[in-house]
Image: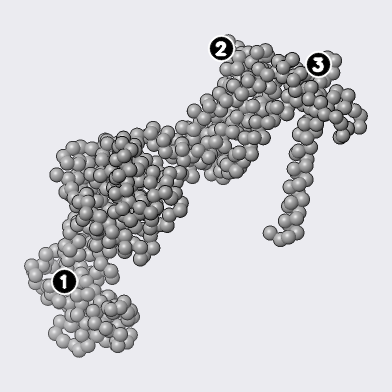
Amino acid sequence: MSRGWRTFAIGVLIAVLVIALIPWVWMLLTSLKTRLDALADVPVWMFKPTFEHYPTVFLDKSYLPLVWNSILVASVTTALSLLFGVPAAYVFARHDFRGKEDLFFFFLTTRMAPPISVVVPMFLLFTTFGITDTPLAVILAHSTFNLSLVVWMMRGFFADIPREIDEAALMDGHSRFGMFARVLVPLAAPGLAATAVLCFILSWNEFLYAFVLVAFEGRTLTVGIPGLITPHGTLWGQVAAVAIVATLPIIVFSIFVQKHLVRGLTFGAVKG
Amino acid sequence: MGVRFHQISKVFPDGTVALNDFSLEFDTGEFVVLLGPSGSGKTTACRILAGLEEATGGIVEVDGRDITGLPPRERGMSMVFQNYALYAHKSVFDNIAYPLKVRGTPRKERERKVREIADMLRIDELLRRRPRELSGGQAQRVAVARALVWDPAICLMDEPLSNLDALLRLHTRTELKRLHAELRRTFVFVTHDQEEAMTLGTRIAVMSEGALVQFDTPRIVYRRPATRFVAEFIGRPAMNTLDGAVRGGRFSAGAINLPADGLPEGPIALGVRPEHLLVHEAPGEGRIPLEVDVVELVEPDTLLFLRGEGVSFIARMVRDGGELDPKTTVHVEIPRKHRHWFDASTGTRIHSGS
């Protein structure tokens, strides 16, 4: 790459970075501003920070259980999706059967429809089973979306492991399941971590289903935010405080697995 | 007692016939080489013995026990793969120890056995490394160590040397032979390289198109090939074969005319190894005049590519033939005892009484 291109590329990256980060920095600042500063006509950059919003919203308004709900929903969703998705992905990567690619494509199509198009049917379904307004409903809804993602990403990671490894494990004395669980899964661990993080983030961020399916105790953090939009005006400082807390795990996880995340997603695209 | 393939057939889902009525029997303790060109079914046979592939028909027995339906782990066999298939996330030590670990060997004994085999293969310095930090030759030894460490009854090797460079391949070949002599274990070795087969095997199973063609010691496979296919596959350069016919007790093919007593009348093929051709400069009784086409020095020998009317030969001269120029005429003698005869249509060996 020539010098000129390099400079240009770095320029573009900086521009993208600034555009992407401004809302987040704005949010961080807002969470530290008094209501007066937050609503100033001309944005205030220099101000005396206040930390009142965090304790107010999480302790006084009891948003702390919502953090727990979010963690519960995202963790169980991730666990469920991996539990069913990883073995399926392995089969897609290793075995040939009739209609395999069609089935694989069918899995992907579950993500093609706009999520909102199935929210009503799913609500009715969960009502029939009597599980609306429980975290279980949200977990099941999120898992249906994440499952295809897991299959999609993990297929690529498994396909990347030579077939002879499976056979070596069998010769070394493993049963088929032992080979999968004790050799293949550990070998695919980096990809597994990336996939798990992506599942977790998607579930953690999801608003629509969480909002429609639960109203009270089971609310997640994302659903809690609209509760701060009151008839007396929006409590921007508290909204920002909740949002900051909600973005933290995503930032931490993404930094850890970004390399594998990119690899996993492009894998599926090329090899799928 | 030993290993017995009985009328094994294997058809893959796409319709490819890999094995067709394949039968083979050998004893424990042998070094059996499955030799054949690609597509001959040698790898499939090996994988069926390992239990990695399911036979479409037929049975496999070990020591009289039918193992056809058993999963690999219940067969007491190990395998060295062409690409070694080492576990990338484990150290060399853990790779070698893995079959012991899976089979529940106590830690102390695991340690002892790994050290013992590592010592034997001279990889004791590498035990702490990761597979990606190994050279091809080292990785190959680790794979062999992993296959032998737990004393399997049979060790299978699927072209284990083909990813090594030429010099290392020779060296490793010798090592394997030494290992076999020391361990007295049954080795089944798959290769397409006839030289490897000749040097390693106590017996060679030559395969073609999914069936066994000949199963004999290297010496017999070389000296008395059962078919024209074996004759042409074993030996470098390959055996010269000529299509001709016997009429009135004489064999003729192009410029060649030889007495053929005891052979049936009709089309037949003559075979003679390059090193058995006697090349003379003067004409004589029974000598065939041929023109030298190309001279190749394969020190210390010389290869002559000879051409005559309707025939061509390769001759290997043990003496220095560098003085022979292309276009000169030489006179070739085919000694009677080195003539091989093959049926023109089936390719099977015909015994001529000589």
Answer with left or right where residue A95 lies relative to residue B208: right
At mark 2, the secondary structure is helix
Disc nearest the viewer among 3 and 2: 3
Does residue B349 appear anywhere in the picture? no
**Between B173 and A45, the one nearer to me in the picture:** A45
Chain of the residue under the numbered disc 1 shown in the image: B
Q: Quadrant of the C terminus of chain B?
A: bottom left
In the picture of the structure, the residue carrying the numbered disc 1 is: B339
Same subunit, labels 3 and 2: the answer reads: yes
Sequence-wise first label, 3 or 2: 2
Q: Residue beneath label 3, please?
A: A230
Measure the C-alpha gap from mark 3 to mark 1: 105 Å
The answer to whether residue B203 is left or right of residue A128 is left
Residue type of the residue flagged with mark 3: Thr
Q: Quick one: B28 or A92, which is closer to the camera? A: B28
Say few, some or many: other residues with alpha carbon within 10 Å of mark 2 (under 14 / 14 to 19 / 20 or more): few
- Disc 1 element: loop
